[in-house]
Image: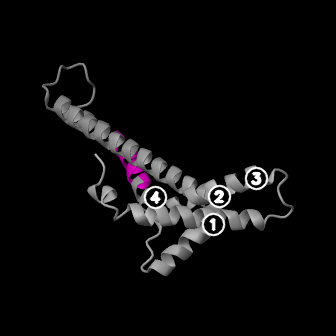
Amino acid sequence: MYPSKFFTGELLIPLAVALVCGAIGGLARAFGAVPPPTSRRASLAKSMAVGAVAAVAGFYVLEPETALRFVAAALISGYSGPALLDALDARFRVLAAEARAAAAVSAGRAALDKADSTVRRIGALPSSGSVTLAPGDTVAVALAELDVPRARLTALELESAR
């Protein structure tokens, strides 16, 4: 269920370092606040908690190469806590929206393919005599009408690829 390296300490130690450095960064932010908060103790605890969470979130996003860069990134993440969390929240919302859009385009593409095959099967049926167009013409018109939504889906795919 959980990665094995989490329990061996390979991830646990850097996570603890990120929490501590983030809390220190949050504390530095609280001390630098002008004007100072009214409820100092609650504000310090809140700043430290937000800083620690932001540093762990930064640990998820950033991959520093050295221990010094890791500590610096955790301190900066902790100091910029609320802004970093807001930015990460916005990024994850964009990723979720892109995933939903890709799923919708995929479902639309599947529906168009099904409609295409249905029209082709109908075109293969013998003519009943009640249609004014020849069966081949009916299929051509129906397939041409499917080109518009297919072009829209292609445009959406190209736009989302940017």
Query: At 41% from the left edge and 65% from the top edge, which residue is drawn?
Result: 13
Q: Amino acid at mark 4?
A: Glu
Location of the C terminus by quadrant is bottom left
Provide the residue designation for mark 2: 48
SS type, badge 2: helix
Residue 140's mark?
Answer: none
Q: Is residue 153 above or below residue 61?
A: above
Of the numbered discs 2 and 4, the one sitting upstream in the chain is: 2
Dot 3 crowding, Cα within 10 Å, few <14, some 14–19, many 20+: few
Give, as a three-letter code, the residue at label 2.
Met
**Element on which disc 3 rests:** helix
Crowding near the residue tagged with mark 1, few <14, some 14–19, many ≥20 C-alpha atoms within 10 Å: many
In which quarter of the view is residue 12 placed?
bottom left
Q: Earlier in the sequence, mark 2 or mark 3?
A: 3
Magenta segment boundaries in residue numbering? 145-156
Residue 5 falls in which quadrant of the image?
bottom left
x 57%, y 59%: residue: 52
In primary-sequence order, the first of circles 3 and 4 is 3
Q: Which residue is mark 3?
A: 41
Q: Nearer the viewer, residue 47 or 92?
A: 47
* Residue carrying label 1: 24
- Residue 2 percent location from the top left of the image: 31, 49
Query: Which one is nearer the viewer's eye here, 116 or 38?
Result: 38
Q: Is residue 80 visible?
A: no
Residue type highlighted by circle 1: Ile
Pick the front one: 158 or 133: 158
